[in-house]
Image (cartoon, helix red, strand yellow):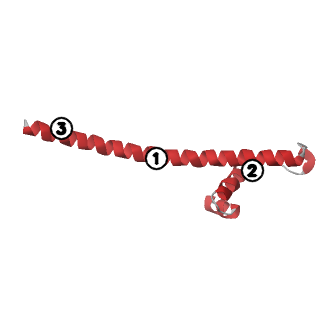
Amino acid sequence: MRDQLEQRISELKAEQEKGQHMLTDLDTRRAELQQTLLRISGAVQVLEELLAGSGSSPQDGVAVGAGGAERAADGAAAAANGVLPSMAGAARGD
């Protein structure tokens, strides 16, 4: 009987450890998702401001090509975190 209880304790501890690792992974994924959503929100805001400021005319010299929205989002997210956009680009490897 004692052996069975000790075995069950061992199984439960292993399951608990596995659950803790899963929880840590989920917390990491949640933080990454929050950062992604912040970047998207910043990109939307920047693009809306560009659109509002340009009068929606593509000839105003404002063009956002491939990667432009991502850089705008990086700048907005960095500004929200109190980091200068130039620092955010450097951290990303631009």
Q: Quadrant of the C terminus?
A: bottom right
Q: Earlier in the sequence, mark 3 or mark 1?
A: 3
Q: Position of residue 17 (x, y in %)?
A: 30, 45
Where does label 2 land, which residue? 68
Where does label 1 land, which residue? 27
Q: Is residue 65 left or right of residue 57?
A: left
Q: Amino acid at mark 3?
A: Arg
Query: Considering the numbered disc 1 on the image, is that residue within a helix, a strand or a loop?
Result: helix
Q: Position of residue 22 (x, y in %)?
A: 39, 43
Q: Is residue 61 left or right of residue 25?
A: right
Whole-angstrom CA distance, mark 2 to mark 3, is: 56 Å
Give me the disc on residue 8: 3
Q: Is residue 43 left or right of residue 25?
A: right
Callout 3: 10 Å neighbours few (<14), some, many (20+)?
Answer: few
Whole-angstrom CA distance, mark 3 to mark 1, is: 28 Å
Q: Nearer the viewer, mark 1 or mark 2?
A: 1
